[in-house]
Amino acid sequence: MIYAVIAAGGIGSRMGAQKPKQYIRIGDKTIIEHTVFKFSKNINIDKVIVLCPADWVDYTKELFTDTDITVICGGLTRNETLMRAIDYIEESDGLRDDTYLVTHDSVRPFVTDEIINKNIEAVRRYGATGTVIPATDTVFQSRKGVIIDSIPDRSELYQAQTPQCFGALKLRELYNSLSDEDKDILTDGCKIYLLKGYDVHLVQGDVSNIKITYPHDLIVAEAILGNNN
């Protein structure tokens, strides 16, 4: 079974809005509706689970009243949210070796079927995936934010996007093996796999697969939406 797990737990403080940014409208729908639709219509996705803040569960359910979308409360961190999704899947359907999570940011509404399908194909083969695009800008590393300490080779750098995909049983096993300190430091599933010595296969993303974070991103999103219609 392939589960799309839409992480919608953010409050969007950098957006400066009076509501979580995933509930801002672009075009005729909220951002989260645009995102969820991409997965609900994909023929390779068996079920879509949306995990959002507790105060927004009822509102989110209303957005998807006429669909088979499952809405539950997320955790305080991204990894806690993923564990809640796995717990829900175990209780509702059971977990097997071929239970996979296609995890995605609720505020990346322009993910394509091609990116989703490539991730599904890769996670079935390799066990874990991360969507990326090559870095186009030179990146400075500074430990204290005052001077440049190093300039990494750009040809080896990639910008992370989502989806990230994992086998549900393996992800839970690795997460449960972490110390409390590691759980506080590691912010997503890919970092857990790397810490535990497992490979994460890269999947090519797209520059249009943007994460809507700042007010300017809404302008870009409206432009992309207009070009796609």
Image (spheres, rainbow, N blue to C red):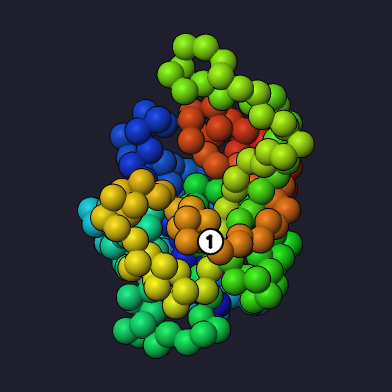
**Residue type highlighted by circle 1:** Gly
- Residue 41's spot in the image, x, y percent? 61, 70
Q: Secondary structure at mark 1?
A: loop
Q: How many marks?
A: 1
Image-based side of 12 in relation to 33, left or right: left
- Residue 80's spot in the image, x, y percent? 32, 60
Is residue 60 something one can see in this rendering?
A: no
Disc 1 residue crowd, few under 14, some 14–19, many 20+, Cα 10 Å: few
Quadrant location of the N terminus in the rendered image: bottom right
Q: Quadrant of residue 221?
A: top right
> Could you say which is closer to the camera, residue 45 or residue 82?
82
Image-based side of 16 in relation to 218, left or right: left
- Residue 23's spot in the image, x, y percent? 40, 47
Q: Residue at x 26, y 55 (%)?
A: 180
Q: Residue at x 55, y 42 (%)?
A: 211
Q: Residue at x 37, y 28 (%)?
A: 16
- Residue 219's spot in the image, x, y percent? 58, 30
Is residue 5 something one can see in this rendering?
A: yes
Judge whether 187 appears above or below 87 on screen. above
Q: Quadrant of residue 34?
A: bottom right
Q: Residue furthest left?
A: 55
Can you identify the residue that label 1 sits on? 197
Q: Residue furthest right?
A: 155
